[in-house]
């Protein structure tokens, strides 16, 4: 059995990093943007997936959300926080 050198391991890691799956928007149905664009602020389960442990909204490059829907997600999170459905700051 051949042992891998450090350079071989680095090459494998780089290759694996490049082969990450393409993120796609969870709100867009098959690439078509419907109008009006709306993300439900009462859907806490979905909104929690778009917020990190510190309570910050995750960026588009992390979630794969399209720009139009990212703005709608931001509005929905702000509304949910105002209504008391989501916390502003996560308790430790």
Image: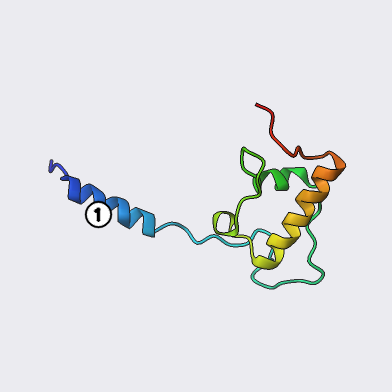
The answer to which image quadrant residue 39 occupies is bottom right
The residue identified by callout 1 is 11
Q: Position of residue 78 (x, y in %)?
A: 78, 50
The answer to whether one can see residue 42 in this image is no
Left or right of residue 8: residue 23: right
Q: How many labels does the image show?
A: 1
Residue ID at (75%, 60%): 72
Q: Is mark 1 on a helix, strand or loop?
A: helix
Instruction: Determine whether 5 is above or below 33 in the image.
Output: above
Residue ID at (81%, 53%): 40
Q: Quadrant of the N terminus?
A: top left
For the residue pair 79 and 3, the one nearer the viewer reads as: 79
The answer to whether one can see residue 43 in this image is yes
Q: Position of residue 24 (x, y in %)?
A: 58, 62
The outermost residue toward the front is 89
The outermost residue toward the top is 92
Crowd band around label 1 with a 10 angstrom C-alpha radius: few (<14), some (14–19), many (20+): few
Residue ID at (80%, 43%): 81
The outermost residue toward the left is 2
Q: Position of residue 75 (x, y in %)?
A: 78, 56
Q: How is the image coloured?
A: rainbow
Q: Quadrant of the C terminus?
A: top right
Residue ID at (25%, 50%): 10
Left or right of residue 53: residue 77: right
Instruction: Determine whether 44 is above or below 21 in the image.
Output: above
Q: Where is residue 80 in the image (x, y as percent from the top left)?
A: 81, 46
């Amino acid at each position: 059995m051949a042992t891998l050198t450090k350079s071989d391991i680095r090459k494998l890691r780089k290759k694996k990093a490049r082969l990450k799956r393409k993120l796609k928007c969870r709100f867009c149905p098959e690439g078509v943007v419907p109008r009006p664009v709306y993300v439900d602020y009462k859907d806490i389960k979905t909104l929690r997936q778009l917020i990190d442990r510190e309570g910050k909204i995750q960026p588009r490059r992390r979630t794969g959300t399209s720009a139009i829907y990212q703005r709608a997600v931001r509005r929905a999170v702000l509304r949910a926080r105002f209504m008391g459905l989501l916390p502003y700051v996560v308790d430790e």
